[in-house]
Amino acid sequence: MAQTVAQPTATTPALPAKLPIGAIVPWAVFFGILMLVLLYFVGAEQGATSVVNGADVHEWVHDARHLLGFPCH
Ligand SMILES: [Zn+2]
């Protein structure tokens, strides 16, 4: 009784490229700090902790502040 056995194909499966973690960490830290600065300006740039005088920054990010649920007025 002859049996047919599937032969493995000659092609190897494509492996994803390895990510160089040393090249990603500085960018992750940079964007993390950038996001924290953005979060500060959206969520806390007002009143006594204000970095920029006036209400211009607050007015520019006012809708984002309400969207993210920060207390405003
Ligand atoms: Zn508001």
Image: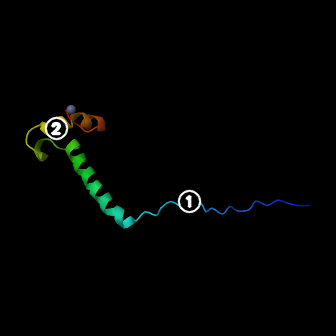
Query: Is 47 or 40 nearer to us in this picture?
Result: 40
Seen from this angle, which residue lies furthest left?
A: 53
Between disc 1 and disc 2, whose residue precedes? Answer: 1
Seen from this angle, which residue lies furthest right?
A: 1
Seen from this angle, which residue lies furthest front?
A: 10
Write the residue at 20% across / 45% down: 41
Residue 71 position within the rendered picture, expressed as x and y whole percent measured from the top left: 23, 37
- Crowding near the residue tagged with mark 1, few <14, some 14–19, many ≥20 C-alpha atoms within 10 Å: few
Seen from this angle, which residue lies furthest bottom?
A: 22
Residue 73 position within the rendered picture, expressed as x and y whole percent measured from the top left: 19, 32
In the image, residue 62 sits, relative to residue 5, either above or below, namely above
**In this rendering, would 1 be left or right of 6?**
right
Write the residue at 22% across / 42% down: 42
The residue beneath circle 1 is: 14
Assign a secondary structure to mark 2: helix
Ligand 1 quadrant in view: top left
- Crowding near the residue tagged with mark 2, few <14, some 14–19, many ≥20 C-alpha atoms within 10 Å: many
In the image, residue 16 sits, relative to residue 40, either above or below, namely below
In the image, residue 54 sits, relative to residue 29, either above or below, namely above
Q: Real-space Cα distance between discs 1 and 2?
A: 50 Å
Assign a secondary structure to mark 1: loop
The residue type indicated by label 2 comes to His
Residue 29 position within the rendered picture, expressed as x and y whole percent measured from the top left: 29, 59
The residue beneath circle 2 is: 58
Residue 37 position within the rendered picture, expressed as x and y whole percent measured from the top left: 22, 50
Does label 1 point to a residue whose CB lies under 8 Å from ligand 1? no
The residue type indicated by label 1 comes to Ala
In the picture, which quadrant includes the N terminus?
bottom right
